[in-house]
Image (tube, grey):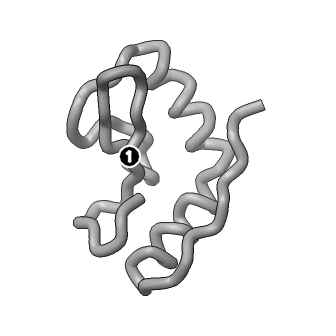
Amino acid sequence: MYYDDHNPPHFHAFYRDAEAAISISTEEVLAGDIARRAHKLLVEWAHLRHAELADNWRRATSGESLLPVDPLD
């Protein structure tokens, strides 16, 4: 996530040379492109970590420090 980023709430994911912005609420790719397998793992992770991602978006837009979000096990 980036501070002062635009709505809707999202996070940025990087895989190899690709980058994508992923919606926190719908888990869809908003911008960019990422491999289908990587996207599938991101959707699983985002679904499990939805509350943490939403809280970090709130924190980022309020200028607060972000909290670490655990990786997919």
Q: Position of residue 25 (x, y in %)?
A: 44, 53
Q: Position of residue 15 (x, y in %)?
A: 42, 25
Outermost residue, right direction? 73
Query: Of residues 4 and 7, which is closer to you in this image?
Result: 4
Q: Position of residue 60 (x, y in %)?
A: 44, 74
Mark 1 surroundings within 10 Å by alpha-carbon count, few (fewer than 14), some (14 through 19), many (20 or more): some
Q: Is residue 42 above or below residue 62?
A: above
Q: Is residue 34 above or below residue 24?
A: above
Task: Place residue 26 in its image quadrant.
Answer: top left
Residue at 60% from the left image edge and 32% from the top image edge: 44
Task: Place residue 36 in its image quadrant.
Answer: top left
Q: Position of residue 8 (x, y in %)?
A: 29, 61
The amino acid marked with disc number 1 is His
Q: Which residue is mark 1?
A: 12
Query: Of residues 10 and 1, which is closer to you in this image?
Result: 1
Query: Of residues 1 and 55, which is closer to you in this image?
Result: 1
Residue at 63% from the left image edge and 61% from the top image edge: 51
Q: Quadrant of the C terminus?
A: top right
Element at label 1:
strand
Residue at 48% from the left image edge and 21% from the top image edge: 38
